[in-house]
Image (cartoon, rainbow, N blue to C red):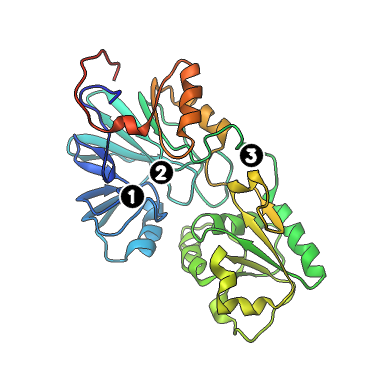
Amino acid sequence: MKSDLNPLLTLSSKGLYCPIGDFHIDPHGAVEHAVITHAHSDHARKGSKHYYCTTSGVSLLKSRIGKAIHVRNFDYRAPFVLGGVKISFHPAGHILGSSQVRLEHEGRVWVASGDYKREPDPTCEPFEVVPCDVFVTEATFGTPSFRWNKCTNLGLEMFEWWKKNSEQGINSVVFAYSLGKAQRVLGVLKPYMERSVFCHPSITELTECYRAQGVELASTVCLSEVARTRKLRGEFFLVPQAFLKTEQAEVLGPDFRTAFASGWMAQGSRGYDRGFLMSDHADWDDLVRTVKETGARRVYVQHRGSGALVRHLNTLGLEAFPDSELKPGPAVQQLSLF
């Protein structure tokens, strides 16, 4: 492991683990202490004994994994201690309540980014740069081919697309992930949308969690309240991708257009009638920018883009490694700044 002899984070069979504090960050399975960056299902899983998350993320976490979980919640930047390690949550800008996890022990500071983005989003707290010695960063879109146009008004683009379809009696179906992306679509549509958006039931409860936190969203109607025999025309639908295979999709009738709101639209519309390049992850430029701004001298990179980002950071003079290097191995005597 390219680290000091007493690292704050290692990579275990259940994900990121702090051996000094004896807790996991976003564990892959049930553990004693689970520090959760956000409520997406690949980060928050059932079965752990104790959960720790942000105050604004509690209702989403309970909605996803169970109302009866034992959870302690903390405001952003409010420190707490597990096993002698000082921990605090800092805004990640990914979805409502999403956080980076700052760890401090004996003068060393590590930060695990979780998922994050740097673009403005009316539905969640804006990203905050957290200075650190070691930065463990995501890299979902960690190749130079993924770059977003930060000046695009996606809310207006979606509204105008819907308006054109609506005038022809054609329904507009936007596919979006039920947590985070769907609410962001509703958030950017809020200044423009003239009618209620028809939302899939999987989106509705999560959307109410956002509204309870004071997030302003476009008006919605849950599709569970619409009879399947009713045929709608010229409406805006916000649904997961599997919706078209369900009986509820009969409300669309034969005339509808599809779109997908995703960072993957940087590679083309992929068979949809329209693609909206809306990502809840940092693009290549913002990944590199964030690493630089943290001041970290050592970086561990997670997810699919790790190779390209590691190579680039090395050219910048940083010690960068894929997160596999966090797996415990034979101790190697070496000088370390951390």
Q: Classify residue 243 as left or right of residue 275.
A: left
Q: Residues within 10 Å of mark 1 (few under 14, many from 20)?
A: many
* Residue 35 placement (x, y as % from top left): 29, 46
Q: Quadrant of the C terminus?
A: top left
Q: Are marks 2 and 1 in contact (CB under 8 Å)?
A: yes
* Residue 126 placement (x, y as % from top left): 51, 42
Q: What residue type is labelled 3?
A: Trp
Residue at (39, 56) in percent of width and height: 41
Mark 1 falls on what kind of element? strand
Residue extending farthest bottom: 229
Q: Give the camera-side residue of 278 and 132.
A: 278
Judge whether 246 appears above or below 191 on screen.
below
Q: Nearer the viewer, mark 1 or mark 3?
A: 3
Where on the picture, by quarter, is residue 88? top left
Q: How crowded is mark 2: few (under 14 residues within 10 Å), some or many (20 or more)?
A: many
- Location of mark 2 (residue): 99
Q: What residue type is labelled 2?
A: Ser
- In whole angstroms, how far apart are the C-alphas of marks 3 and 2? 22 Å
- Location of mark 3 (residue): 148
Residue at (49, 29) in percent of width and height: 309
Looking at marks 1 and 3 on the same chain, the residue that comes earlier in the sequence is marked by 1
Judge whether 311 appears above or below 115 on screen.
above
Mark 3 falls on what kind of element? loop
Specify whether residue 199 is in view: no
Mark 2 falls on what kind of element? strand
- Location of mark 1 (residue): 53
Looking at marks 3 and 2 on the same chain, the residue that comes earlier in the sequence is marked by 2
Q: Give the camera-side residue of 96 and 305.
A: 305
